[in-house]
Image (cartoon, rainbow, N blue to C red):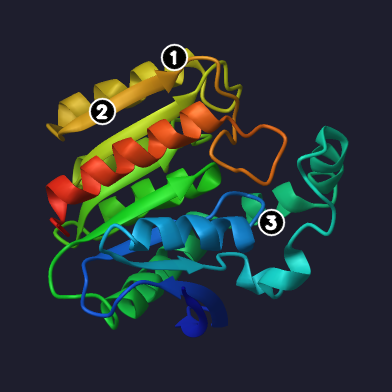
Amino acid sequence: MGQTIEVRAAAGPAEAYLSGTRGRPGVLLYVDAIGLRPQIEAMADRIASWGYVVLAPNVFYRDGHAADLAPKADLRDPGERAAFFGTGVMDRVRELTPDRSGPDAAAWVAALEQHAGAGPIGVTGYCMGARLAVRTAGQLPGTVAAVGGFHGGGLVTDADDSPHLAIADSTAEYVFGHADQDRSMPLEAVEALEAALVAAGRPHVNEVYAGAAHGYTMADTSVYDEAAGERHFRMLRALLDRTLGAA
C-alpha cells in the first residue's frame, strides 16, 4: 500500500515509509525503540486506510538504514526480544536527544506536508516515540492538532526538558494509553502527566490499559496484547477523526 521515500533530515538523508492517498489529512507516526520495520509499515497502512496519509520515518537514521537496524530474529519469542534489546538498542534511544529530535521533527513534518492536504496534522508515537510525539506538538503549535501516545516511556522526568513540559506550549488534543505497571511510566508519572494536561487546558484522554504490558501494540513481539492493541486503534481513530476530520 505504501512506499519508502527519502527525507532530507537534519543530519542527512533518512528513509521514511509513506502510506495513503495524496491530499488527505496528514499523520506522522513515530516508531518504538525497535525501529522502522514491517510491523510499523502495517500500522501506517491501517491508519492510512481510515482516510489519512501517514509518514513513518526512520528516526535512527544516524545509526544506519532501517533494514540494518531491524531485528533479524522473531521477537515473538521472549528470549529473542530480550536478546535484541541487548544489542545497543537503548544506546540509540538515549542518543536521540531533543537537540537532535527537534530539527528532525521539522523535517518529518515538512516531508509529510508535501503529500498531505492543507491543514493541521496528527502525530502518534509508541514507546519512546510517544516522547517524540509530545515534543513535536510543543515545538509546532498550530500545526499539530492531535497527539496519540501509547505505552510511552519517560514522558515525565525530573529534567528541565521533560517531555510533558512541552504540553504547555501545544494546541493539540491528546490521547494516551499507558501500559499497566510499566516501569518506564509508573502511576505517579501518569498522574503528573494528567496534571500537566489539565494545567494546559488541553482536551485529553489519559488512561492505563489494565493488564497490558509495555509494547502492547506491537504484533511482532512477545508482549503484544490484541485487546489492548485494538483498543488503541479505536481511540486513535476517534482522535484523528475529531481533530482532522478525514471522513
Q: Is residue 72 above or below residue 168?
A: below
In the rendered structure, find residue 92 and report the number of the disc placed on it.
3
Q: Quadrant of the C terminus?
A: bottom left
Helix, strand or loop at disc 1? helix
Determine the CA span between mark 1 and mark 3.
27 Å
The location of residue 63, given as percent across then percent down, is 71, 69
Dot in front, 2 or 1:
2
According to the image, label 2 marks what residue?
205
Helix, strand or loop at disc 2? strand
Mark 1 vs 3, N-terminal side? 3
Q: Residue at the location (12% across, 31% down)? A: 201
Determine the CA span between mark 3 and mark 2.
30 Å
Helix, strand or loop at disc 3? helix
Q: Is residue 107 visible?
A: yes
Q: Categorize mark 3 by other alpha carbons within 10 Å: few (<14), some (14-19), many (20+).
A: some
Q: Residue at the location (39% across, 31% down)? A: 231
Foreground pick, 163 / 6: 6
Residue type for callout 3: Arg
Residue type for callout 2: Val
Dot in front, 3 or 2:
2
Q: Is residue 150 above or below residue 98?
A: above
Determine the CA span between mark 2 and mark 1.
16 Å
Mark 3 vs 2, N-terminal side? 3
